[in-house]
Image: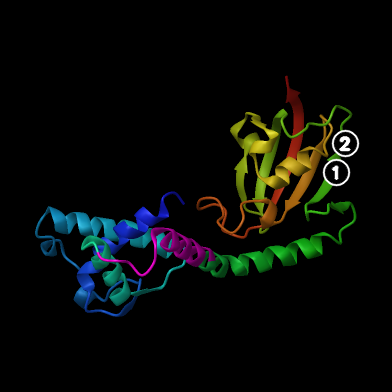
Amino acid sequence: MKRIVLVFLTFLIFWGSFAQKKTIKTQKAPASTKATRDELKNALDSMSYALGVLDATFFKQQGMEKVNFEMMNKGFDDVLNGKSTLLTPQQCDMTVREQIQAFMRTKSQATIDEGNKFLAENSKRPGVTITPSGLQYEVITMGTGPRPVDTSVVKVQYDGYLINGKKFDSSRDRGQPASFTLNQVIRGWTEGLKLMPVGSRFKFYIPYTLGYGEQGAGNAIAGGSALIFDVELLEIVK
């Protein structure tokens, strides 16, 4: 989330033209009020509309449902006309960050609850070990080689699954092992691989707090997702 203040200010440009409206939900307009290209009279109209679409899309993806047009327009006018603002740029940045985090928590809560339920049941299975951080792992094959450390470059084969069994990533399917520095991946991997001697194959059950958090990863991994990885440690790269 880089330079969120600038993103938010560009978001204001589009909404500033709607000063008479108070509050709106970011949902598709009825067919009778659907915008047409004829409303774009000049380059400024096109740029303002484009900024509105891009920024509204971003905030809607974070879970925003309502906008107070009166206060948004006031913020826009205050900045454009050189007036004193009700909040400093730093306060604006913090406010937007806090609200987006709240939106993300609400959006991901059902996924978090589902993952926690799965992990609670999984922890009862024979052969599953739980670390103090909450990582669960299961030994498929125990190797005899050295164990990696945080700064080790490792070569692995792996399959990644959601808790519903859907595979979202696989080095085995690509036909080529993956190599990376251990401290540059998700925490569940960093912790889990340090438990594995070279030649081992473990199954990791990773809570969202040790995975991709409340933000998730792209379209494949929703925010708050618990993850399952079948990992084989092939070697520590010299």
Q: Pointer 1: what residue?
A: 139
What crowding class fits label 2: few (fewer than 14 Cα within 10 Å), some (14-19), or many (20 or more)? Answer: some
Query: Of helix, strand and loop, which one carries label 1?
Result: strand
Q: Is residue 92 magenta?
A: yes
Instruction: Report the magenta stretch's main SS.
Output: helix
Q: Pointer 2: what residue?
A: 142
Q: Are marks 1 and 2 in contact (CB under 8 Å)?
A: yes
Q: Amino acid at mark 2?
A: Met
Query: Of helix, strand and loop, which one carries label 2?
Result: loop
Q: Is residue 20 left or right of residue 99?
A: left
Colouring convention used in this rendered image of the protein: rainbow
Considering the image in quadrants, where does the C terminus appear?
top right
Q: Amino acid at mark 1?
A: Val
Residue 203 place in picture, x, y as percent: 78, 46
Residue 194 place in picture, x, y as percent: 79, 37
Q: Which residue occupies 30% across, 57% down?
A: 10
Q: CA distance from mark 1 to mark 2?
A: 6 Å
Q: Is residue 116 left or right of residue 27?
A: right
Return the residue nearer the eye: 167 or 38.
38
Q: Is residue 194 left or right of residue 58?
A: right
Q: Which residue occupies 79% across, 64% down?
A: 120
Return the residue nearer the eye: 25 or 219.
25
Q: Which residue occupies 76% across, 26% down?
A: 235
In this rendering, does residue 216 appear at all?
yes
Q: Is residue 121 left or right of residue 169?
A: right
Q: Which residue occupies 65% across, 40% down?
A: 185
What crowding class fits label 1: few (fewer than 14 Cα within 10 Å), some (14-19), or many (20 or more)? Answer: some
Residue 56 place in picture, x, y as percent: 34, 62
235 is higher (above) or lower (below) than 42 = above
Q: Which residues are magenta?
A: 83-101
Residue 228 place in picture, x, y as percent: 71, 50
